[in-house]
Image: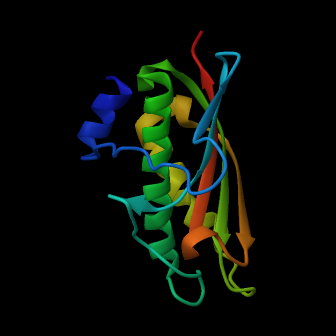
């Protein structure tokens, strides 16, 4: 089953990727080997779906759902960059940032929303390294932002 078929099976349709909100590119393909995806926010249809900080404005489950939207946006950027998800050899790394209160400690559970979806879609090729970091704020008052490193099939 192709990765795009897996998305359909999961009931996920990929959005048009968001345009950068500052001075950067949404992705960068290096030596046709590694694809770097810039940080993605939980934006759907041009709207930031979740806003605020974990531990104050949002629950861990809401953060998980926000991270899942970030992962969908990462996959949309991958498809735009490569033309086909079948060119993915491995999702190498996710870097997740969670806007939270100082006492909040469930950052990893939030970023699991992205990790779980990436594994559901890409299977073994979706196993990745990861970091989940708490920060005091993120662009547009987003609760999380996630970037990715992808190895491209040769």
x then y, percent, for residue 33: 67, 18
Q: Residue at x 71, y 16 (%)?
A: 31
Q: Residue furthest top?
A: 154
Q: Residue furthest bottom?
A: 56
Quadrant the C terminus occupies: top right
Instruction: Return the residue nearer the eye: 86 or 50.
Output: 50
Q: Is residue 29 above or below residue 98?
A: above
Query: Dividing the picture into quarters, in which one does residue 132 lie?
Result: bottom right
Question: Can residue 51 be seen in the rendering of this structure?
Answer: yes
x then y, percent, for residue 28: 64, 31
Q: Is residue 81 above or below residue 100?
A: above
Q: Residue at x 58, y 90 (%)?
A: 56
User: Would you say 62 lies left or right of 106 here?
Assistant: left
x then y, percent, for residue 40: 55, 53
Query: Dividing the picture into quarters, in which one does residue 151 lie?
Result: top right
Instruction: Return the residue nearer the eye: 19 or 112.
Output: 19
């Amino acid at each position: 089953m192709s990765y795009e078929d897996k998305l359909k099976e999961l009931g996920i349709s990929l959005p048009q990727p968001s345009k950068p909100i500052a001075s950067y590119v949404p992705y960068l393909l290096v030596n046709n080997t590694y694809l770097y995806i810039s940080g993605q926010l939980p934006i759907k249809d041009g709207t930031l779906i979740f806003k605020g900080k974990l531990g104050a404005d949002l629950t861990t489950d809401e953060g998980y759902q926000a991270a899942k939207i970030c992962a969908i946006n990462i996959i949309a950027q991958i498809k735009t960059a490569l033309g086909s998800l079948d060119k993915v050899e491995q999702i190498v790394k996710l870097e997740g940032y969670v806007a939270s209160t100082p006492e909040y400690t469930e950052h990893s559970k939030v970023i699991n929303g992205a990790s779980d979806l990436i594994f559901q879609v890409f299977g073994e090729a979706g196993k990745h390294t990861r970091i989940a970091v708490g920060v005091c704020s993120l662009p547009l008052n987003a609760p999380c932002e996630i970037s990715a490193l992808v190895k491209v099939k040769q």
